[in-house]
Image (cartoon, rainbow, N blue to C red):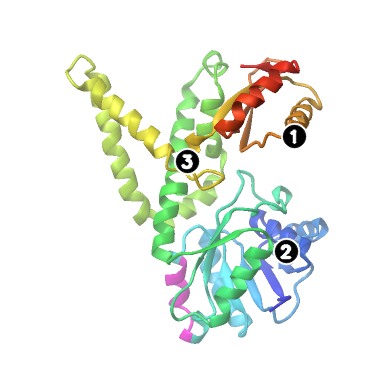
Amino acid sequence: MSEPKVLIIGAGLLGTSLGLALSRQGVVPGIEDLSKANQRLAIEYGAGVRPFEEPDLVFVCVPPDITAQAVVDQLKKYPRAIVTDVASVKSFILEEVASQVDSAALARYVGSHPMAGREKGGPGSARADLFFARPWVITPRVDNDSLAVSLIRDAANRIGALPIELSVEKHDSAVALVSHLPQLLSSLLAARLLSGSEEQLNLAGQGLRDTARIASSDADLWIQIISQNAGQILPLLVGLQSDLNQLVASISNLDEVGALAKVHTILDAGNRGVSKIPGKHGGKFLEYQLVTVVIDDSPGALAGLLMFIGEIGVNIEDLKLEHSPGAAIGLVELQVMPESAGRLVEKLSENGWRLV
């Protein structure tokens, strides 16, 4: 179907971002929300129009604890439409939906989950490029309508997402490892900062900011996600607890033979784990070489650096900007392919850029 009629239920971060992305591709969706203020704001941003009748595809973009009921409502309201949702957990929602609709309606429901988001929610935080180059997991079943998966895949492709098909069980296991567990660990770490003094926290560097960043996510939203995927998260926490107990025991008795070796084993396992995170080109994160440049904390400084790097023909694989409290400079950490690092350092040095 070249131009499907799309309806978005929920004008929060994901719903509004989806509406913006689809609208830019010429598919202007209808969008509705229980909050008329959110709905109006999303429409004024250009994320869609007021709902129209008989959509071909409905995206349910509401909080996890009301997603299943919203899916059921849309299946009943639009008896010919394909319905999907964007919640973080799929098995729980599928079970809830299956218990409330007949097999014909259930065939029109396919769960999906874009692996994208921000720490801040609401339509005011929406971005049209939120899903670009990000995985969009689709969880088809053998009983699904033949049109269902193709409609969702087409929508994901239109906005530049990367559709991937997984079973609901494999999806929930995967997100527990790569999303839900990191959220809990980041929150636990950030909670330790509550007892820190101002003097201590003034020493915080990028390492702390990186590991604590997602701890600022919406606690009310995350309690819904965790409660729905507790069965997949718990074994990971138990394994982590075992590792932590071993680390505590080793550090408590560093004079014992083998204690430092156990600590080293944990640190080395972390190195090997990081190396498994896919990079930009499907390789390993550690393949990139780091080049750090000092820039002034002033308008245009970063733009000038990036423009210069573009002029010398070096491609940046990843970038991070770090500020230290009270310092009038910024540290730009550039990740480049090893074969480009030498030339980049040489050209930057020749042209007066300060390197770390």
Q: Secondary structure at mark 2?
A: helix
Q: Which residues are magenta?
A: 93-103
As shown in the figure, which amino acid type bears the numbered disc 3?
Lys
Evaluate if marks 1 and 2 touch, with contact meaning CB atoms under 8 Å apart: no
Residue 303 rendering spot, x and y as whole percentages: 78, 31
Main secondary structure type of the part rendered in magenta: helix
Mark 1 or mark 2: name the one nearer the start of the chain: 2
Q: Quadrant of residue 182?
A: top left
The residue nearer to you, when weighing 325 against 134, is 134
Q: Which dot marks residue 121?
A: none
Q: Which residue is mark 2?
A: 22
Mark 1 or mark 3: name the one nearer the start of the chain: 3
Query: Whole-Å distance between the Cαs marked 2 and 3?
Result: 32 Å
Q: Which residue is mark 1?
A: 310
Residue 191 rendering spot, x and y as whole percentages: 47, 31
Q: Secondary structure at mark 1?
A: helix
Q: Which residue is mark 3?
A: 284
The correct choice, above or below, for 348 with respect to 238 in the image is: above
Q: Quadrant of the N terminus?
A: bottom right
The residue nearer to you, when weighing 295 against 225, is 295
Query: Whole-Å distance between the Cαs marked 1 and 3?
Result: 24 Å
The correct choice, above or below, for 217 with respect to 319 in the image is: below
Residues packed near mark 3 inside 10 Å, few (<14), some (14 to 19) or many (20 plus) = some
